[in-house]
Image (cartoon, rainbow, N blue to C red):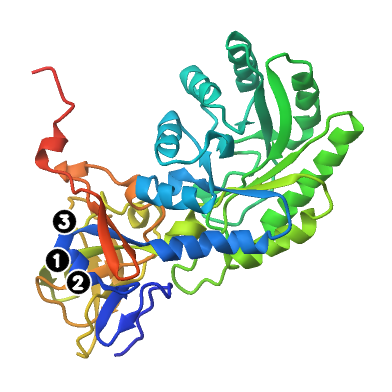
């Protein structure tokens, strides 16, 4: 059995028998920082981000990176220097983005449960706008802004009741979901906001889900936002910003989503003459295929039915397969030329869900061999935990021929650093 291994990124190529990140052998990074370690390509991140910029060329726009996808400060700083904004969902993400050099005036604050303290923090920082998700939230923002003697710039996140046709756990644009203002009641709420002293209406927003392989639902959502903008104008409320959110998917296996530049160009054509600044909030499509997690084989366990390759990474490090049943390519860091076999690649955690891939073709593995789990740059480390008393993994970044550690591996001391009471 033979197969060609695919990392879904030209920034993670095989050269000879070795897997590289840019011009750095992944084996060198594993030797330098240990395993498991997340490894990112800085140039892959910039290539995806600049794809959005190229596709939107000539249109007033902001590409605001969804910090929830990956909040490492080195990644955020890289994007800040390239001109990115930030899509935020918590006070912690606001602090991360500010510390990483993203200006507050390029930040959009989303989320259905913003606390009063988080709203105050964002007002003090001077963010670009709040994406308001309910009438009670609007009233809270109005009150807190007046207390601070400010006017809060607001946009309403519209729930367009459009099926994103993605995984049910990451679909957010249907009536059954907790997100946004229902389409039918939007104009009435905008009119109420227009009378408030503490808010300034600046935009219309939407975000219908994540990891979309077909951009059609996103473009249908944009049509609805443009329709609402026209209705609001007729009611005397002018909108200067349209926020279409994120959601563009990446290739994990055999999918064929639009590239950022292709998708952005389709959006540009629809919005070109509407007179508003476009905001996009991509996350996965910028960092997803810009990262892998490198792990080491601990044991190879053979039964009468199958072979298990047990690695030192686990579901606490990369939770997507366990939570969503997500597929990630698994490839050897060094090709051996030996006949492949089908194996289950699993971690050491005491859960049957701690499996990264079942019946995957790999050359015969030995303890100490290195594997790379691909497409792990988005919602990888961001969703990691200390479950089973495991320390959080390291993170590294490559830039051409150079690499550096961008997050130290935790120690056992970190497991109980903040515990008290005994």
Residue at image point 52% right, 21% down: 124
Indicate which disc, 2 or 3, sits on the residue closer to the N terminus.
2
Which type of secondary structure does the marked residue at label 2 adopt? helix
Residue at image point 80% right, 30% down: 187
Q: Give the image quarter of residue 262.
A: bottom right
**For mark 3, what is the residue?**
348
Q: Viewed as shown, does residue 379 lie left or right of 128?
A: left
Note whether residue 106 is visible. Answer: yes
**For mark 1, what is the residue?**
31
Packing grade of label 3 (10 A; few <14, some 14-19, many >=20) is: some
Which type of secondary structure does the marked residue at label 3 adopt? loop
Q: Viewed as shown, does residue 254 lie left or right of 326?
A: right
Q: Where's residue 85, x and y in %? A: 54, 44
Q: Where's residue 402, x and y in %? A: 28, 66
Packing grade of label 1 (10 A; few <14, some 14-19, many >=20) is: few
1 and 2 marks in contact (CB < 8 Å):
yes
């Amino acid at each position: 059995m033979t197969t060609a291994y695919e990392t879904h990124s030209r920034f993670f190529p095989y050269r000879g028998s070795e897997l590289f990140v840019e011009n750095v052998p992944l084996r060198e990074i594993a030797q330098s920082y240990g395993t498991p370690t997340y490894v990112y390509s800085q140039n892959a991140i910039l290539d995806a981000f600049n794809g959005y910029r190229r596709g939107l060329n000539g249109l007033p726009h902001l590409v605001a990176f969804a910090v929830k996808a990956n909040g490492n400060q080195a990644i955020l700083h890289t994007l800040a220097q390239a001109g990115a904004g930030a899509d935020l969902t918590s006070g912690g993400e606001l602090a991360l983005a500010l510390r990483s050099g993203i200006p507050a005036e390029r930040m959009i604050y989303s989320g259905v449960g913003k606390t009063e303290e988080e709203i105050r923090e964002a007002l003090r920082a001077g963010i670009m706008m709040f994406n308001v998700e309910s009438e009670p939230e609007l009233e809270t923002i109005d009150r807190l802004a007046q207390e601070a003697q400010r006017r809060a710039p607001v946009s309403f996140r519209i729930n367009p009741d459009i099926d994103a046709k993605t995984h049910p756990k990451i679909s957010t644009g249907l009536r059954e979901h907790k997100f946004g203002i229902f389409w039918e009641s939007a104009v009435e709420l905008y009119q109420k906001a227009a009378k408030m002293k503490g808010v300034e209406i600046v935009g219309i927003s939407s975000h219908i889900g994540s990891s979309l392989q077909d951009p059609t639902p996103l473009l249908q959502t944009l049509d609805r936002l443009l329709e609402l903008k026209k209705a609001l104008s007729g009611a005397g409320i002018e909108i200067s910003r349209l926020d279409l959110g994120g959601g563009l998917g990446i290739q994990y296996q055999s999918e064929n989503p639009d590239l950022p530049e292709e998708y952005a160009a389709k959006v540009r054509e629809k919005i070109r003459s509407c007179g508003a600044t476009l905001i996009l909030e991509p996350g996965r499509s910028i960092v997803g295929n810009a990262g892998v997690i490198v792990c080491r084989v601990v044991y190879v366990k053979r039964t009468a039915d199958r072979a298990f390759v047990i690695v030192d990474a686990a579901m606490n490090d990369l939770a997507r397969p366990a939570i969503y049943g997500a597929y990630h390519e698994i490839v050897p860091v060094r090709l051996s030329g030996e006949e492949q076999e089908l194996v289950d690649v699993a971690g050491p955690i005491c859960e049957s869900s701690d499996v990264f891939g079942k019946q995957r073709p790999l050359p015969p593995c030995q303890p100490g061999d290195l594997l790379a789990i691909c497409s792990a740059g988005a919602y990888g480390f961001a969703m990691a935990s200390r479950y089973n008393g495991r320390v959080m993994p390291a993170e590294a970044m490559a830039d051409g021929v150079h690499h550096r550690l961008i997050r130290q591996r935790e120690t056992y001391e970190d497991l109980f650093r903040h515990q008290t009471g005994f």
